[in-house]
Image (cartoon, grey):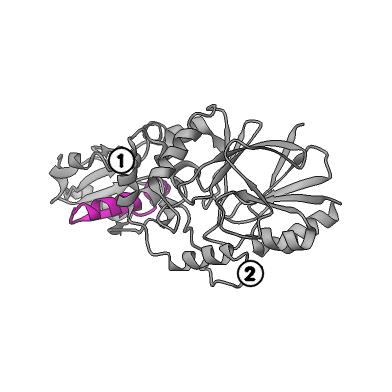
């Protein structure tokens, strides 16, 4: 039967309602405890029966609503066989096919972010949990308990065998990105750049993600099947699960007007643009840049050696990828690294030209 999917939560934690079109039976994917009453009100208002809750993995940034909904509705609570939560009522394995609210769902075991990560494959859709996010977001971080970047690499290779038209629906999105297909992610997502497993592991380690002690406490709460939304003090306005959002910012920022003044006066730092080639072609770029996409930067650092002592300003679309790149360069010993504040979006918005005339060429 044709599947109907609906995104439910406001904010970055994505929960989805799944059902066969027109059916009164529904399943919830990755529901968060903060929205339990909203889920229950929806079920009551639309005369729906919740048959299953599926968590794509043990969450580290919020407490799952699975145990609470299990208690209050009698639904099945579904997770991978490796999930540590003892309240899970239905455990699945790689290759299993389930009927979820009238919809056929295939299970793909995708460890890396956690040992129990799964993707749900539904009629040309892949609900990827934290195994794969959208665009520059990369994917879920692998430095928490149970994380393994080598396993994550293997899981991503499995996802890459899916048709390029497969729509990717992640469990988080922090920047209001629209769902897109796997073909776009091959081009834009730094986690999917062609590289060996060893290069991928080095790329993640080089990002040097920030501390996440509170996330370990959230994992413990979900292991214990907590029903308490206040079991852990969770910081607001953070994007901790996304690798590029969690990457510790390094280097100072430089405002567009200040960089323009420097370039026009002849004080010319090296300009490193870490966007993708198609972004440069469609959106434009500053003159005399060195172009290395973020996903390739870890294996091409030697190309920046000539600029090590002169200083480097890193550019991307909005500043997120540039901050991650700055961290990589800082760890590699580059002494003066800056990020163009607001990236090319701010540069253009403030009326700065793309055909900037440089007083001195490098």
Please state the total of marks drawn on the protein image. 2
Residue to which mark 1 is pinned: 198
Q: Find numbered disc 1 in the image and state the secondary structure of the residue it sits on.
A: helix
Residue 146 rendering spot, x and y as whole percentages: 45, 55
Whichever of callouts 2 and 1 sits on the residue coming sooner in the sequence is 1
Q: Find numbered disc 2 in the image and state the secondary structure of the residue it sits on.
A: loop
Q: Quadrant of the C terminus?
A: top left
Q: Looking at the picture, tell me which residue is in the foreground, 236 or 204.
A: 204
Residue to which mark 2 is pinned: 229
Residue 271 rendering spot, x and y as whole percentages: 24, 44
Check whether the beta carbons of the residues at disc 2 and disc 1 lie within 8 A of each other.
Answer: no
Q: Which mark is residue 17?
A: none
Question: Which class describes the residues within 10 Å of circle 2: few (<14), some (14-19), or many (20+)?
Answer: some
Describe residue 18's horizontal placement relative to residue 167 as left or right: right
Is residue 234 visible in this depiction of the protein?
A: yes
**Residue 343 highlighted magenta (yes or no):** yes
Q: Quadrant of the N terminus?
A: top right
Residue 320 rendering spot, x and y as whole percentages: 40, 51
Is residue 282 depicted above or below 322 in this figure?
A: above
> Residue placed at 66% from the left, 31% from the top?
123
Furthest toward the right, the residue is: 47
> Residue placed at 47% from the left, 59% from the top?
240
Q: Looking at the picture, tell me which residue is in the foreground, 327 or 261.
A: 327
Q: Looking at the picture, tell me which residue is in the foreground, 315 or 64.
A: 64
The magenta span reads: 324-350
Task: Look at discs 2 and 1 and give the one toward the viewer.
Answer: 1
**Residue 112 highlighted magenta (yes or no):** no
Displayed quadrant of residue 231: bottom right
> Residue placed at 15% from the left, 44% from the top?
305
């Amino acid at each position: 039967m044709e599947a109907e999917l609906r995104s439910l939560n406001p904010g970055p934690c994505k929960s989805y309602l799944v059902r066969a079109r027109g059916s009164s039976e529904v399943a919830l994917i990755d529901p968060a405890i903060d929205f339990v009453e909203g889920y229950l009100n929806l079920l009551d208002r639309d005369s729906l029966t919740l048959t299953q809750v599926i968590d794509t993995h043990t969450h580290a940034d919020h407490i799952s609503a699975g145990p609470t909904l299990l208690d209050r509705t009698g639904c099945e609570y579904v997770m991978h066989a490796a999930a540590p939560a003892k309240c899970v009522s239905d455990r699945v394995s790689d290759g299993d096919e389930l009927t979820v609210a009238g919809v056929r769902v295939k299970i793909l075991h995708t460890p890396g972010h956690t040992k129990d990560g799964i993707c749900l494959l539904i009629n040309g859709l892949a609900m990827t949990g934290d195994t794969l996010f959208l665009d520059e977001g990369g994917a879920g971080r692998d430095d928490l308990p149970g994380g393994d970047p080598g396993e994550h690499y293997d899981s991503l290779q499995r996802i890459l065998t899916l048709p390029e038209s497969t729509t990717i629906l992640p469990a988080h999105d922090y920047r209001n990105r629209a769902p897109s297909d796997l073909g776009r992610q091959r081009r834009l997502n730094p986690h999917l750049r062609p590289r060996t497993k060893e290069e991928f592991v080095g790329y993640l380690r080089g990002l040097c993600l920030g501390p996440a002690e509170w996330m370990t406490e959230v994992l413990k709460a979900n292991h214990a099947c907590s029903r308490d939304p206040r079991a852990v003090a969770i910081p607001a306005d953070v994007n901790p699960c996304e690798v590029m959002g969690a990457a510790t910012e390094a280097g100072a920022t430089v405002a567009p007007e200040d960089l323009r003044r420097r370039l026009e006066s002849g004080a010319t730092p090296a300009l490193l643009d870490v966007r993708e080639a198609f972004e440069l072609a469609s959106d434009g770029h500053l003159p005399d840049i060195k172009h290395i996409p973020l996903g390739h930067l870890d294996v091409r650092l030697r190309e920046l050696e000539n600029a090590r002592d002169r200083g480097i300003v890193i550019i991307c679309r909005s500043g997120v990828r540039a901050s991650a790149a700055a961290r990589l360069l800082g760890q590699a010993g580059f002494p003066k690294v800056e990020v163009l504040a607001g990236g090319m979006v701010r540069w253009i918005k403030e009326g700065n030209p793309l055909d900037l005339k440089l007083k001195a060429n490098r």
